[in-house]
Image (cartoon, grey):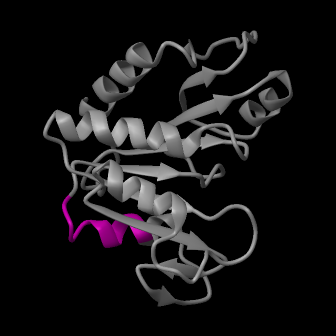
Amino acid sequence: MAVDQHCPVLQIVGYQNSGKTTLVEKLIEAASADGMEIATIKHHGHGGKPDTEITSKDSRRHRLAGASFTVVEGQGVLQMEGVRSKWSLENLIELYQYFQPDVILVEGYKAEDYPKVVLIRDSEDLSLLENVTNVLCAVVWTPVDIENVKTFPIEAQEQYIKYILDTMRD
């Protein structure tokens, strides 16, 4: 955790339909069951602005899983509602200081440098590991060879959830 950071930040990254939102939901549920207060930030990375409906599908899933606070950002539109030319991840994390969560889970923002869980569906997704930093672990859908990265099969949910939660608590 950075000196000026008020709580741990963990990113969940992967290509579209890799299971990012599902993993965030599972982490929220497990952390909430342990008494942790979780806030989430969702990057709307599919191009364009997020839906104007404040109950965006993924952020709604975050809230229903138990997140205390969640925002979605895409092309400068922040659903919480505020508009400016751009919202940086740093700006959003600073904003969350007011809400004092125990952990901030970030879905997306691949280029940022916070600890990451990377979701890999197949060998074609391995290129993602070349473009991200600070990888805590990878959760893989099919057996793939990844050097120097702690790897869990998608079926080992209990093990990787425990590993990730233990890391968030440290």
Q: Quadrant of residue 67?
A: bottom left
Q: Nearer the viewer, residue 132 or 102?
A: 102
On screen, 140 above or below 61? above
Quadrant of the frame with the N terminus: top left
* Lateral position of residue 40 relative to residue 166, left or right: right
Most extreme residue toward the left is 35
Quadrant of the frame with the C terminus: top left
Q: Does the magenta stretch include residue 96?
A: yes
On screen, 155 above or below 56? above
Q: Position of residue 142 (x, y in %)?
A: 72, 15
Q: Where is residue 51 in the image (x, y as percent from the top left)?
A: 61, 77
Q: Where is residue 47 in the image (x, y as percent from the top left)?
A: 76, 68
Q: Which residue is drawn at 55% across and 71% down?
A: 73
On screen, 71 above or below 130? below
Q: Which residue is drawn at 67% across and 20% down?
A: 141
Q: Magenta part of the protein: which range?
A: 92-100
Q: Residue at x 49, y 36 (%)?
A: 23
Q: Nearer the viewer, residue 2 or 30?
A: 30
Q: Is residue 130 magenta?
A: no
Q: Where is residue 92 in the image (x, y as percent from the top left)?
A: 42, 69
Q: Residue at x 75, y 40 (%)?
A: 131
How many discs appear?
Answer: 0
Q: Quadrant of residue 120?
A: top right
* Lateral position of residue 53 relative to residue 133, left or right: left
On screen, 69 above or below 10? below
Q: In which quarter of the image is residue 129?
A: top right
Most extreme residue toward the right is 124
